[in-house]
Amino acid sequence: MKKIFLLSLMSAFLFVACKKDKDETEESNPGVTNPSSEYKLIEKDTTDNDLIVELYAENETLEMGYTPVYVKVENLNGDLVENAMVSFMPMMDMGMMQHTTPTVQPIYNSTSGYYEGVIVFVMSSSQGAWDIEIMVDGEAATMDLNVLGAPAGEKHVGSYVGTNGDSYFVSIVKPLDWSVGMNDVSFMVHKRESMMSFPVVEGLTIAMDPQMTSMGHGSPNNISPVSVGDGFYEGEVNFTMTGDWRLNLDLIDAGDTIVNANIDVLF
């Protein structure tokens, strides 16, 4: 009986101790997810004002196309910095020229503890060298990036010269989680104003025609994407079977088709 009683006391003590540790952790950062447990660390740097800046993504590798990224900012005590002014500028150095790429600038999410944004990588690192400058309260943290091409048989972003002479970039919004049947689908459209400016394009009409390239057929009941603001276009695509699908997208402005784009997916 004494052994059982002692074990019960030890179990109760351990339970209280563990609960106390857990409560103290939650009180220090209530409602904040530990970034290292949810996303993968890509790179980190420290600014001149002693802030630790870490860049996370959903995978350890970055790929061409629409890429959600997450910035965590801490002070030297390990406390999250929640009210900083954070922005980033990815740059591709091709030797003879440099350019940036379409982005959605980061906004702080108090639930996760990240500054959350998007980078649309329009090239892979095989064509040059990517890095990213993250500005935090006027100080910079710079990190090198390795960007892979899309998986074989897939194309998640494309660049096109429109009939009006402007360069357009069409990317499919990730993550991609397809199934046979009707699927929500979303795209972003950007235009290149200069090598350092890629604004979103709103108000287009998009006609979508999915085709299974290897089988020579399409699918019925698709809903072409419509503009929902901030350069996003949302619709529905009907995948009648698994395999290689090409999403043909006609970008129409004021009744005229200015771009014939396509996105390739495989599942």
Image (cartoon, rainbow, N blue to C red):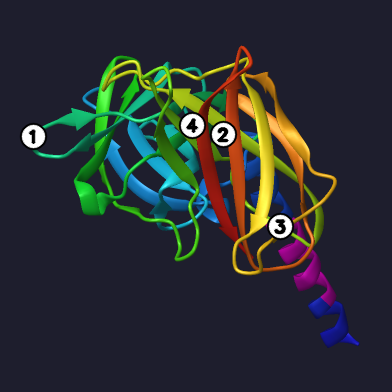
Residue 256 makes an appearance in the image: yes
Task: Name which of mark 2 and mark 4 comes first in the sequence.
Answer: 4
Kind of residue sitting beneath label 3: Trp
Which residue is at 59% across, 33% downward?
Answer: 250
Kind of residue sitting beneath label 2: Gly
Which residue is at 36% across, 19% downward?
Answer: 165
Kind of residue sitting beneath label 1: Met
Are the residues tagged 2 and 4 within 8 Å (C-beta)?
yes
Give the spatial CA distance, label 2 vs label 4.
Answer: 7 Å
- Magenta span has 13? yes
State the residue position of label 3: 178
State the residue position of label 2: 113
Work out whether 171 lies above or below 205. below
Kind of residue sitting beneath label 4: Leu
Task: Name which of mark 1 and mark 3 comes first in the sequence.
Answer: 1
Which residue is at 23% across, 54% downward?
Answer: 126
Secondary structure under tag 4 reads: loop
Residue 244 drawn at (x, y percent):
60, 64
